[in-house]
Image (cartoon, grey):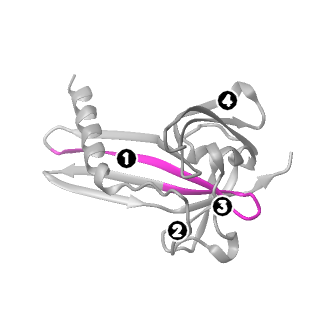
Amino acid sequence: MNRLRGRLCASLLVSSISQGCVTIHAPLVADLEYPTSAWGEPIILGPECRAVAGTYSNEGVVIGDDGANSQPLLLTSALNISRNAKAVSLSVRTRRLDRNGDAFITLSVVPDGDLTGLHELEGCFCIKQTLVCTQVSETYWSVPNFGLGGAQRNIHFGLSNDHSLIAKLQNYQADVILGLPVFVMKEPWARFPHLDR
């Protein structure tokens, strides 16, 4: 019961702190950390974000917070899918449109074209023609009389000029340690090349 209470408290903490701090990047536009000269300007995904449908290399790169120092990143890892693959196919299914023309989306992820490995992400939205997937991964912790906290990842998707998948990863963590609140947010950019199939 204490574990469940700790997780609930951590969830409420992360939710309440993040409500005022986490932003939706829609439409997705370049910022100071985005490598415009190498990747070109981000392109929006059109109505209901259908332009994201395609096959991408699972092996991509993530750019550090300083806009430099790229490191390898797997698309499956970014999406919290524990599956190794060479290619990842994405498609969207609109569940519902709101009155502003934004859509509630299910993002289908198929590693290496193997439908038995299909993953469907329900917490996705097409907002201002940008695909936003929320709560892609979540972790919580609590230690009685010491503290509690949690971490969460959201992802904002667009395309580059060469139709590579562009992602702004929104990683944030909120903790209360010995009564002191701590909030950390990192928003690096990632790119996954488009594959012709």
Q: Residue at coordinates 29% horizontally, 54% vertically from top-left? A: 20
Specify which label sits upstream in the sequence, 3 or 2. Answer: 3
Name the element at disc 2: loop
SS for callout 4: loop
Work out which residue is located at the far top of the displayed protein and give it.
1
- The three-letter code of the residue at mark 1 reads Ala
Q: Amino acid at mark 2?
A: Gly
Residue range highlighted in magenta: 146-169
Q: Earlier in the sequence, mark 4 or mark 1?
A: 4
N-term-proximal mark, 2 vs 4: 2
Magenta highlight on residue 142: no
Queried whether the magenta region covers residue 167, the answer comes back as: yes
Q: Is residue 149 visible?
A: no
Which dot marks residue 171? none
> How far apart in space, not on screen, are marks 4 and 1 (Cα)?
25 Å
Q: Please state the horizontal and vertical placement of residue 167, each as a whole percent of the image.
A: 59, 56
Question: In this rendering, which labeled residue sits more in front, label 2 or label 4?
Answer: 4
* CB atoms of marks 1 and 2 within 8 Å: no
Circles 3, 1 touching at the beta carbon (< 8 Å): no
* Comparing labels 3 and 2, the label whose residue is closer to the camera: 3
Residue name at image x 41 percent, y 40 percent? 138
Labels 3 and 2 touching (C-beta < 8 A): no
Q: What percent of the width, then of the height, locates residue 32?
A: 51, 75
Q: Residue at x 56, y 69 (%)?
A: 30
Q: Which residue is mark 2?
A: 64
**What is the crowding at mark 3: few (fewer than 14 residues within 10 Å), some, or many (at least 20)?**
many
> Could you tell me if residue 5 is visible in this image?
yes
Q: Secondary structure at mark 3?
A: loop
